[in-house]
Image (cartoon, helix red, strand yellow):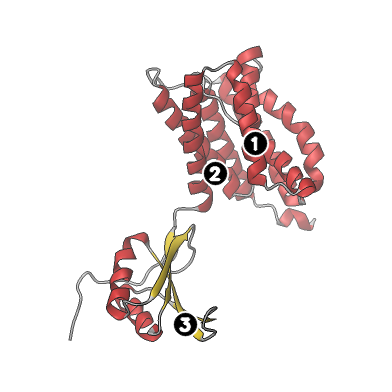
Amino acid sequence: MKWIKKISFLDLFMILIGGSIFAWGLTNINIPNKLADGGVSGIALIFKALFNVNPGISVLLINIPLFIIGYRFLGLKSLIYTFWGIITFSGSLSFWGMFKMAPNLHHDQLISAILAGILGGFGSGIIYRFGGTTGGTDVVARIFEDKFGVPMGQSLFALDVIVLLCSLVYVNIVQMMYTIIYSFVFMELVNFTEQGSYTGKVFMIFTDKTEEMVNEIMNSLGRGATIIKAIGGYTGKPQNIVYVVVDPSEMNDVREIINKIDRKSFVSIYNAQEQIGEGFTFNRPHRSIFKVGI
C-alpha cells in the first residue's frame, strides 16, 4: 500500500524514545515531588494522586475517545503517528511505574521542577520533531481550530490552565508555583528540541551601496548574501535590500561592515529560528584567523 511508504521507522523509533523520556520524568520526578502538569498527562496525575490510578491506563483511556472524535481532522500519516505516540507514551508510563528509579533530589523543589522540565520538554520535543504527538489536548485544540477558528495555541493554553487549576486539589500553592517553573522550562526545551539549535541572525540592510556591502560580507565572513529588489512605499523609487543570515557570534562583524560601507543605511535585525544549509548544517567555508593584506 502506498501510504506505508510515507511511514518512517526512524520516526516511529524516535517517537518511542521521546515518549519514554517524557514518561520517565513524570514517573520519577513529577509524581514523587508533587509537580502537576497540563493536558492529559496532568489529568492522569490528578487521578494518580486522588485514586491511585496507573497514569499509563488513565492516559490511554482518556485518549481513546479523543482519538476517535479527532480522526477526521488528521491525515492518515498524522493519525498513525498520533496513535503510536499515545500507545508508546501510555506503555512507557506503565513500564516506568513498575520499575521506579526516582533520583534523590533531597526534596529540593526547584531542582525537581527544572529537571522535570528538561526531561519532559526534551522528550516531547523529540516526539513533535519526528511528526508525532501524545494525543490528548492536541486533538481537542485541532477540533476547536477547524470548527470555531480558535488558534491552537490559545486552546492549548486555556486547556492547560484549566487542568492546572484542577490540580490544586492535590498540590498546594507553593507546589503550583514550582509547577509553573516546570512548565516554563518544559516549553523552552520543547521549542529548542523541535526547532533545532541551528539558529541565526537575519540582517536586512537597506542601502544604496549593495554591491560593496555584499562583497565585503562575502570576503570578510565567507557568508552568502542576496540582493532583493524592492520599491519604497513613500518615495515609489526602486530600492535594493541586502539579505544575509549569520551566526549570532558574527553579529558584531556585520555591524562593523555596515558602519564601514554605509553608516546611513537602514537595518532590520531579527531571529531566524532554524537554518538549514551551507554554513549552518553543512560545512562552512573556512575563515582564517589571520587577515591577509596586500
Quarter of the rendering containing residue 207: bottom left
From the viewer's perspective, is residue 122 above or below residue 39?
Answer: below
Three-letter amino acid code at the position of disc 2: Gly
In the rendered structure, are the residues bearing label 1 and label 3 in contact, judged by CB atoms less than 8 Å apart? no
User: Which label belongs to residue 171?
Assistant: none
In space, the residues marked 2 and 1 are separated at their CA atoms by: 21 Å
Image point (47%, 61%), residue name: 272
Q: Residue furthest left?
A: 294
Image point (64%, 24%), residue name: 44
> Which mark is first along the chain, 1 or 2?
2
Percent of width and height locating residue 141:
70, 42
In space, the residues marked 1 and 3 are separated at their CA atoms by: 44 Å
Circle 3 packing at 10 Å, graded few (<14), some (14-19), many (20+), is some
> Which mark is first along the chain, 3 or 1?
1
Q: Would you name the residue on which mark 3 appears? A: 240
Percent of width and height locating residue 64:
76, 32
Q: Would you name the residue on which mark 1 appears? A: 158
Q: Residue furthest front?
A: 234
Q: Would you name the residue on which mark 2 appears? A: 125
